[in-house]
């Protein structure tokens, strides 16, 4: 199983670009505090992350340097040859879900959804013209016949 869950702060603004096929991709780095550090010292790890398609657009729109974010995804290693012909090794988290974890004033998200998750049937398109899955909005849920519940959670039968 290859599953990574991280919560931390962005160390710089997310960098949006497009793949050769025109798919949006964003790269960013998270500062994640270590759970156990030497007494009196806070230590952090700096984790490189990458997100694709609609999720990349979501992250660029709602997060900036210093924003708190929680992500889940998978760890991926890859290699490439740089412009000098040297082999470079990269290990990064391929983000599949992203969540707000700071306050609304901290993330400047007046009324935004609290997270973005790739749909279960989401497949990264091989061609830019292939359809992309998106998470339904609240308005779309209402159109499907769902609505807000009256009462409290104590009234639920489970």
Image (tube, grey):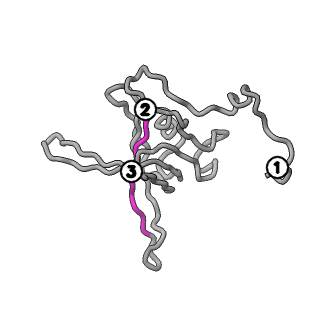
Say which residue appears at 39% left-offset and 57% top-offset: 46
Magenta stretch encompasses residue 42: no
Badge 1 is on which residue? 156
Q: CA distance from mark 1 to mark 3?
A: 39 Å
Quadrant of the rendered image containing residue 111: top right
Q: Which residue is mark 2?
A: 124
Of the image marks 1 and 3, the number of the one nearer the N terminus: 3
Where is residue 154? Give x, y as percent.
Answer: 84, 54
Which residue is tagged 3?
75
Tag 1–tag 3 contact (CB < 8 Å)? no
Name the residue rendered at 74%, 29% in the picture.
Answer: 142
Q: Bounds of the magenta span?
A: 43-52
Q: Position of residue 71 (x, y in %)?
A: 50, 49
- Nearest to N terminus: mark 2 or mark 1: 2
User: Which residue shows up at 59% across the image and 43% down it?
Assistant: 115
- On the rendered structure, is 48 left or right of 84? right
Give the farthest residue toward the left: 85
Mark closest to the chain's N terminus, 3 or 2: 3
Q: Residues within 10 Å of mark 1 (few under 14, many from 20)?
A: few
């Amino acid at each position: 199983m290859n599953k990574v869950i991280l919560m931390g702060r962005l160390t710089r603004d997310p960098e949006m670009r497009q793949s050769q096929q025109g798919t949006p991709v964003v790269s960013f780095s998270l500062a994640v505090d270590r759970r156990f550090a030497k007494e009196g010292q806070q230590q952090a790890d700096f984790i490189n992350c990458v997100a694709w398609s609609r999720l990349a657009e979501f992250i660029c729109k709602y997060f900036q340097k210093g924003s708190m974010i929680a992500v889940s995804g998978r760890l991926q290693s890859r290699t490439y040859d740089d412009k000098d012909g040297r082999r470079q090794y990269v290990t990064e988290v391929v983000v599949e879900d992203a969540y707000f974890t700071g306050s609304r004033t901290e993330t400047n998200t007046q009324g935004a959804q609290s997270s973005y998750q790739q749909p279960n049937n989401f497949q990264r398109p091989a061609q830019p013209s292939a359809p992309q899955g998106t998470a339904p909005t609240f308005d779309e849920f209402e159109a499907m016949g769902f609505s807000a519940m009256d009462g409290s959670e104590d009234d639920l039968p489970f």
